[in-house]
Amino acid sequence: MVFAPGEKPGNEPEEVKLQNASKQIVQNAILQAVQQVSQESQRREERISDNQGHIQLGVGELTKKHEKK
């Protein structure tokens, strides 16, 4: 094996630790991003659902006003 200047033969386990830590950081970041997108989607769906409820009420009110005439 050939080592670069400043690199010691015992560094491989340390490099593996760094790689594993990097993988864990990336996995955590991805998980957090997925959770955030999921929460935002759920909020959006709730807003749409609320708005549709208001629209339904509005249609009902128009119908009632129309029937009274």
Image (tube, grey):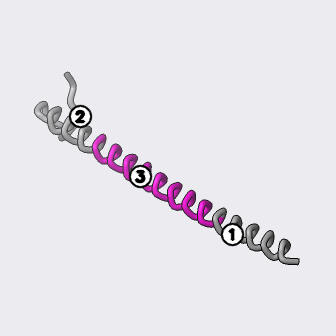
Answer left or right for 18 relative to 36: left
Residue at the disc numbered 2? 4
Q: Which residues are magenta?
A: 23-51
Residue at the disc numbered 3? 35
Q: Disc 3 residue type?
A: Gln
Q: Disc 2 residue type?
A: Ala
Residue 45, given in percent of the width and then of the height, sits at 57, 57
Q: Disc 1 residue type?
A: Leu
Q: Quadrant of residue 2?
A: top left
Residue lying at 23% horizontally and 34% vertically, measured from the top left: 4
- Relative to residue 33, is residue 15 depicted above or below? above
The residue nearer to you, when weighing 47 against 31, is 47
Answer left or right for 35 relative to 58: left
What is the C-alpha distance between the residues marked 3 and 2?
42 Å
Mark in front: 3 vs 2:
3
Residue lying at 81% horizontally and 76% vertically, measured from the top left: 65
